[in-house]
Image (cartoon, helix red, strand yellow):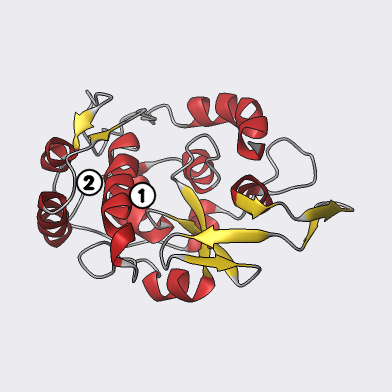
């Protein structure tokens, strides 16, 4: 998989950057365990009110980076990794052609794709990332080490979702919703991000309707 080719380049910077900032308490549980059933993972998420004070997408999280300096930035790396039919690559990572599957709407796309941060940047800020350093936030925005963190989806639905959490938006394709909830909980747990009360209620309700699959975690803070 293309994404794994940049893991080594990203991992050292990511793991170093995601070390707790001095004086900053992690926003989530410090004892995340791999293989926790979904309903238990939801129950373990810490609840806190959201606060967007000081948020600016560009200055808070930066843009796409080219971690391994091969000419392909994070967005392009995700497209290359998730392509059902690989695009042609020319020049400094110009992509032509290709085919992708957007699981949000159960559709195959030749174009019209966005790269979605499963837990949006603004939502991450609201949920604890405001206490991180800039380097930690840039690492989060460009994390290629976790295959569910960044996903190629139909642009219409990424923009419809915007910065909403599952209390206010879910994938239009009903068959995708259990996967989406499981992956949302995974990312929130992995980064020790909190949930607000409405979000916690929504996750609890959705989890009760989904298979109680293990939620794997790889704590980064």
Asked if residue 171 lies left or right of residue 106, the reply is left
Q: Measuring 16% from the left and 56% from the top, which residue is drawn there?
A: 206
Residue at the right extreme, as displayed: 91
**Numbered label attached to residue 130:** 1
Say which residue appears at 59% left-offset and 49% top-offset. 82
Q: Secondary structure beneath disc 1?
A: helix
Dot 1 alpha-carbon crowd within 10 angstroms: few under 14, some 14 to 19, many 20 or more: some
Instruction: Provide the residue designation for mark 2.
Output: 194
- Residue 196 in percent (x, y) is at 17, 56
Q: Residue at x 26, y 53 (%)?
A: 178
SS of the residue under disc 2:
loop
Give the camera-side residue of 14 and 107.
107
Q: Nearer the viewer, residue 10 or 178?
A: 178
* Residue 7 sits above or below residue 136 on the image: above
Quadrant position of residue 212: top left
Residue 141's mark? none
Q: Nearer the viewer, mark 1 or mark 2?
A: 2
Distance CA(mark 1)–CA(mark 2): 12 Å
């Amino acid at each position: 998989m293309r994404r794994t080719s940049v893991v080594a380049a990203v991992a050292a910077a990511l793991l170093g950057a995601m070390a707790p900032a001095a004086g900053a308490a992690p926003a989530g549980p410090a004892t995340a365990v791999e293989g926790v059933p979904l309903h238990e993972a939801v129950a373990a998420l810490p609840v806190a009110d959201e606060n967007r004070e000081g948020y600016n997408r560009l200055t808070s999280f930066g843009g796409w980076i080219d971690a391994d300096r091969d000419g392909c930035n994070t967005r392009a790396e995700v497209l290359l990794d998730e392509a059902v039919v690989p695009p042609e690559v020319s020049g400094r990572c110009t992509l032509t052609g290709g085919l992708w599957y957007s699981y949000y709407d159960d559709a195959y796309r030749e174009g019209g794709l966005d790269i979605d941060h499963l837990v949006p940047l603004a939502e991450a800020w609201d949920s604890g990332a405001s206490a991180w350093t800039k380097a930690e936030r840039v690492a989060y925005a460009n994390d290629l080490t976790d295959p569910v963190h960044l996903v190629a989806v139909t642009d219409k639905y990424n923009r419809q979702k915007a910065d909403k959490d599952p209390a206010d938006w879910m994938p239009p394709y009903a068959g995708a919703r259990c996967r989406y909830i499981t992956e949302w909980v995974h990312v929130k747990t992995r980064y020790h991000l909190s949930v607000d009360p409405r979000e916690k209620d929504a996750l609890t309700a959705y989890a009760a309707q989904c298979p109680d699959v293990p939620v794997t975690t790889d704590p980064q803070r």
